[in-house]
Structures are given as C-alpha cells and as structure tokens.
Image (cartoon, helix red, strand yellow):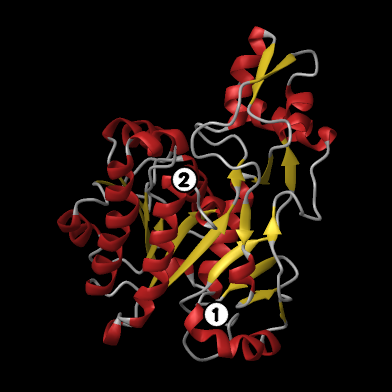
Amino acid sequence: MHGGTLFMTNTHWDNQTILVTGGTGSFGHKFVETMLASHRPRKLIVFSRDELKQHDMRDRFPDDSGSPIRYFIGDVRDRDRLYRALDGVDVVVHAAALKQVPAAEYNPLEFIKTNVLGAANVIDAAIDRNVKKVIALSTDKAANPINLYGATKLCSDKLFIAANSYSGPHQTRFSVVRYGNVVGSRGSVVPFFLKMRKTGVLPITDPRMTRFWITLEQGVNFVVSRLGKMQGGELFVPKIPSMNIMDLARAMGPECKTEIVGIRPGEKLHEVMVSEDDARHTVEYEDSYLILPPFHERDCADYASQNGGKLCPDGFRYSSDTNTQWLAVEQLQKMVASLAEESGG
C-alpha cells in the first residue's frame, strides 16, 4: 500500500484512456455499456482475441468517428501485442481469463498460460508503458483453491498485488477485485438450467451446494467504484448474497424433477471469499471487505481506524454457507425472469 487515505480519489473518466482485456466477454459488454452511459472516457479500448466477437460487439458499440470505442485484436499470452496495445493507456481492467472449472482440470497448461503467464505479461506491459492503474478481476475460487482454475487465479492475484512493490519510478498501481458467481454469465448454471428445464429434469450436483451470487451490473459497478478508490495493493471483496442450488432449481423449474448427478471435477460444496488466514489482515466496511497484503499486516489497525472500517475478528471466514445474506426462491425467480427477458429467452 502507498500512503494517504485509502478511499480518497475518484477518477475523472473523461480524461482517461481505458483498456479492458477480455473485453468481448459478459463483463466486457456490461463494462463498456456502463462507461459509455455514465462516464464517457476519452478512449475505451476492447482488447480480445476473437475477431468474430469483436465484429458482433461492433454492431452494438460502433467505433465510428464520434465514438471513444476502439477494438484491438490480441491475446494476453502475446507480450509484444500487449506492449503495443497499452501505449498511451491510463487504466487497465484485466478481465481476460479461461474460466471453466472442468476444462481447467483436463487442460491445466492452457489455463496457466492465460491466467498466470498472461497476468505477468499485463503487469510488465503496464509498468513499462506507464499505465496509472490496473485492476484485475478474480473469483471466489481463488480463496483456498481446490481446482486448477482457482489455483491459477490465486497465482494471478498474488502477481498483481506483488507488482506494486516493483513498479519503481513508473508508479503503476495494481489492485484486485474478487467476487462470486455472476448471474447468467456464459457457462454458468442459469443458462444451463434454462436449457435443461425444457426436458423436465434439472441435474443437481449436490443438494447442499451454495454459491455467492452477484449480477453483472453489480459486478461492473463495484469494479468501477474501486478503480476510483484504489491506491494499490488492495484486494476488494463485495458483500453479496448466497443461494442454495435447490432453491435455484425451485425458482427456475418448479414443475421439473431433479436428478442428483454428483459434484464435477474441481468443484466445492461451498465457496469462500475471505478465508480464516486472510481474515488476519482484512478490514470490514459496510458494503465490502478489503484484504490488505500480508506483508502490511502490522498496519491493518491503522488502515481500519483511518478509513472507517473495522478489523475482522480472529477466525473470521466469509463463506457462502455461513453468509448472513440469502436469496429466497421468490428473489431468484425475479432475477431469472429479468435475465430471460434481457436475453430474449
């Protein structure tokens, strides 16, 4: 961390050039929509490797002469391409990742190349190109990981936090945002259940399973707000509700039968966003937790008192099964109905 008040600055977006890696994904679409609607940056660069997705995204967000949008084909695995893309960029939102848990178990090296080595490339390019701020998206699966995907994201988190120590005179600052499952994101359980309920049977991995849930809009707004507040070295965790998989099944297919199919490779019964070990250097705020770097542990009490937070008690654990906020079946029904309406399903 670097001196000063933790929550002290807001970004003046109209003066900023922003690049989002993985910009054609679910997060990237909503991030671009939010920035254009509410913030209007000087330039907004969508960096991704899929030309077709960029072509389709261009139909919704044109890059004509009056638009701040620019499209840049590239892969975070390609260090040289990142150096070109980050020339003149002020802020990077790093959303590019391989994310499917079962795929990671069977293709571990591919996930390492993108999620770990790609993160290192983003860090080096950001420092050498004098980017001011980098915020990386993480996942609850990075806390006490048991699967390869979570392990690669934990490595990525560690790389971004540590990067603050060696940015040197460039003064590039790095932080991380960690949150839970995004409602309706590609490859998640909601689109799967929407498809499977046509068969009359919803496959359930384990009826005890719980997950943190956040909407895409909430996730984007949390990232944008923390970009304005970050000083470097923070790992931000929002307070969000949990849901039980059986409640989701009742919400999405009350007339459907359920079939227990067993947990997939690499899955947990419950997810954690602040572990007991992290809690020793975690500050709680009204709407979020802030995990400080372990090597600044002696400063936790000072940060808490200076910024209106409080230290988490010894042994604290922020887990989806012991959460104090829960989504009821009726709330899940409304969220799913809204999602289906947006997607035309």
Disc number for residue 147: 2
Residue 9 disc label = 1
For residue 258, side relative to residue 281 (left or right): right
Q: Judge the density around disc 1: few (<14), some (14-19), many (≥20) Cα neighbours within 10 Å.
A: few
Horizontal and vertical percent position of residue 163? 35, 74
Note whether residue 283 is visible. Answer: yes
Spatial CA span between label 2 and label 1:
37 Å
**Residue 143 vertical placement versus 329 (above, below):** below
Residue at (53, 61) in percent of width and height:
177
Residue occupying the point 49% across, 56% down: 138
Circle on res. 277: none
Q: Position of residue 210 (x, y in %)?
A: 70, 41
Q: Nearer the viewer, mark 2 or mark 1?
A: 2
Disc on the earlier residue, 2 or 1: 1
Q: Residues within 10 Å of mark 2 (few under 14, many from 20)?
A: some
Where residue 211 sits, quadrant-wise, is top right
The answer to whether the residue labelled 2 contacts the one labelled 1, judged by CB atoms less than 8 Å apart, is no
In the rendered view, does 74 fall on the left or right side of 6?
Answer: left
Callout 2, which amino acid? Asn
In the picture, the quarter occupied by the C terminus is top right
Q: Residue furthest left?
A: 80
Where residue 200 sits, quadrant-wise, is top right
Residue 144, placed above or below residue 316: above
Secondary element under disc 1, as helix, strand or loop, is loop
Taking 23 as reference, is 247 left or right?
A: right
Q: Secondary structure at mark 2?
A: loop
